[in-house]
Image (cartoon, helix red, strand yellow):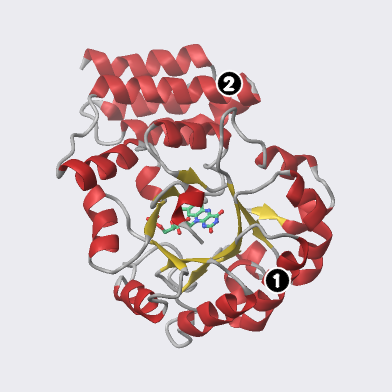
Amino acid sequence: MDIKRIGGPFILAPLAGYTDKAFREIARSKGADSAVSEMVSAEGLARNGEKTKALLERFQGEDRFIIQIFAPSDDPVRRAMDNLLEYNPTVIDINCGCPVPKVVKTGAGSALMKNPEMIGKIIRTIKEYTDIPVSVKFRLGWDSSSINYIEFADTAAEAGAEMLTLHARTRAQGYSGTADKEAFRTLSNHFRESGMLIFGSGDVFTPEDALDMINLYGLDGVMFARGAIGNPFIFRETKDLLEKGSYQHPALQEKIETAEKHLDLMIGYYGENIACREMRKHLMAYIKGIPGSSRVKNELAAACTREEMIAALSGLNRE
Ligand SMILES: Cc1cc2nc3c(=O)[nH]c(=O)nc-3n(C[C@H](O)[C@H](O)[C@H](O)COP(=O)(O)O)c2cc1C
């Protein structure tokens, strides 16, 4: 797949509970080339569930939208395809990394790492319905004694996947421990000259982390995950580092304005109650590390309305 389809190498990763259309809009406005949906259940899509449909709405002007689905097998995927195609995804990504027991016990998410043939079946099923490129986001393996990412990637490639994103941890590691970046080199060398797009995920917390993944480990691109929560500026910083050789962190004013814009988008999309509930974690992340933020954090924790949240944030200016 040509990387132009997804706009470039710097993508907002799928983050359940975070990458709704408001956060994707903020990330794109700060330089993300594309953004991935929260993971969406193929079964939910097949049943046309309201919750699932809400996850798949685009923000106005969202010209590229990678939709990630999760499924334990090809059966729900087959039943979901007609509904999925109504959203015209730019790329259809399959989640093979989610470590959450509720998902894994059904055979979906990272449980697919133990069942590589099934990923082949799921991809072939999607390809019966559409030419939209299929990608896979997967881990090193189930645990350290069953590392199988190359075999898994080969199976996905043979079935027709055109993009692979490796989260360089095992399922057993969850989100802790350091990502094994050497695995990126192994994977990118394995697919050199194949036309396969190879992305990496794991411990991308600074612009330098992102460019190292491209320059040192040979990846085509990077997914920003925890490093972009409360810090969508990392996309612009990374592009500045790439293009100009240096970057500047955002001023406090821009951080506060962006946090407020994010809150207002959420209120516009979901109403004040849901927005304030969902924004608390984002706002805490926006203010992390700012001098004087601990008192503001306490105020945010208690805030239930837009007015209270904005008042709490304004405390940062007074420091
Ligand atoms: C709160 C949270 C939600 C996540 N949700 C998803 C998801 O829906 N689909 C997915 O493929 N990965 C999901 N991930 C994994 C991230 O996309 C990413 O691969 C992982 O956090 C490693 O990158 P990082 O170390 O830079 O954060 C999630 C991670 C976190 C922390």
Q: Secondary structure at mark 2?
A: helix
Disc 2 crowd rating (10 Å Cα; few below 14, some 14-19, many 20+) is some
Q: Amino acid at mark 1?
A: Ile
Question: Quarter-wise, where is residue 220 in the image?
Answer: bottom left
- Mark linked to residue 187: none
- In terms of depth relative to the viewer, which is nearer, 245 or 105? 245
Disc 1 crowd rating (10 Å Cα; few below 14, some 14-19, many 20+) is many
Q: Secondary structure at mark 1?
A: helix
Q: Residue at x 39, y 81 (%)?
A: 190
First along the sequence among labels 1 and 2:
1
Q: Residue at x 41, y 49 (%)?
A: 8
- Mark linked to residue 267: 2
Residue that lies at the very extreme toward the left in this rendered image: 245
Q: Residue at x 71, y 76 (%)?
A: 121
Q: Nearer the viewer, mark 1 or mark 2?
A: 1
- Mark linked to residue 122: 1
Respond yes or no on whether mark 2 lies under 8 Å from ligand 1: no
Question: Residue 314 at x, y = what percent?
Answer: 33, 14
Residue that lies at the very extreme toward the bottom in this rendered image: 145
Question: Residue 80 at x, y = what percent?
Answer: 79, 56
Q: Residue at x 15, y 45 (%)?
A: 245
Q: Amino acid at mark 2?
A: Ile
Residue 264, placed above or below residue 236:
above
